[in-house]
Image (cartoon, coloured by chain):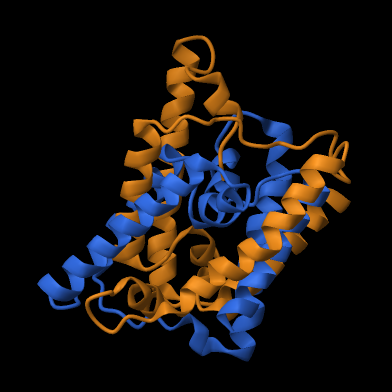
Chain colours: A blue, B orange
Amino acid sequence: MSTLGGVLIGIAAAGLLMFHGRIAGISGIAGGIFRRQTEDIAWRVMFLVGLFAAGVAWSYFRPVDYAFGIERSTLALIVAGLAVGVGTQLGSGCTSGHGVCGIGRFSKRSTVATVTFMATAAITVFVVNEVLGGSI
Amino acid sequence: MKVKLGAFLGGAVFGLGLAIAGMTQPAKIVGFFDFFGSWDPSLAFVMLGATAVYAPVYRWAVRTWQRPIWAPAFSLPTLEDIDAKLIVGSAVFGVGWGLGGYCPGPAFTSVGGGSTEALTFGAAMLVGVGAYQLFMRIREGRSGGPVDPQAAAMIDG
């Protein structure tokens, strides 16, 4: 299932490149909404609405795919969300833009970014699971 | 119209892929990074599957097409240097990903799927994205234009 999901992600990203000429980086698409290029906002909002709509539709088939499954306080979720929001803008990309599209373009910048965020994610999980007992 | 509809369809297929791949389950994300506990390597296949499709299409389209189907030109990243912004930003993002279990795409899809945790995370994420971009706009406004025009015009993803 992981590979099938990955292939769908690849097809969507390839489609956005072929039809719109754009890199399918979610943080970049979201960040652009807050920038000044007004004529550019509609497709970005529609892409994000598509992400959301797929979530709604899939929840009728397999609601279990949205299980949270870990122990996190509301404060931890807010801190995590802020870190992802600011970090992806400062670092110009996230798992999709750097991880899939960037590595797919054989970009050195994106490869370094991907290795960096994978490493700090692993360190964070290590600290939460092994030092704090899996809950924060 | 077709550009907007196409973007919606692209987002929908992308989101469906995220849900099917298991990217919307924070326990799976944490399991993938839990090298010292019960490591679940399955998410590596998500990136492999996606890149295997994307890389050849990218090479083919960018090398042989004059332009994309619905746009006058490809909008591709131009930055090449590895700077502190890239490293620090990516490091901060990774901490948030490991802490909350969501990266940006799955956050949007999981909110659609009705996850209250994703809603809390996603709201904070949008505040972070908006605050950073508005801060950059104010800085650019004061100096009479983009501080870093290249970075302002182009984002890796």
Drawn side of residue B57 relative to residue A89, left or right: right
Apparent side of residue B91 relative to residue B41 in the rendered image (left or right): left
Which is more toward the observer, A53 or B76?
B76
**Residue under the point 76% across and 55% down:** B57
Image-quadrant location for residue A135: bottom left
Q: Nearer the viewer, residue B66 or B129?
A: B66
Looking at the image, the residue that sits furthest to the top is B144
Give the camera-side residue of B89 and A66.
B89
Q: Quadrant of the C terminus of chain B?
A: top right
x, y percent for residue B115: 46, 76
Query: Where is residue B117, by image quadrant?
Result: bottom left
A53 up-or-down from B51: above or below: below
Residue A28 seen in render: yes
| Residue A77 visible from this viewpoint | no
> At 44% from the left edge and 52% from the top edge, which residue is drawn?
A114
Residue B97, given in percent of the width and then of the height, sits at 36, 61
Is B13 located above or below residue A59 in the figure?
A: above
Q: What residue is at 88 percent from the left and 46 percent from the top? A: B69
Please, is residue B48 above or below residue A18 in the view?
below
Residue A44's x, y, as percent?
A: 67, 48
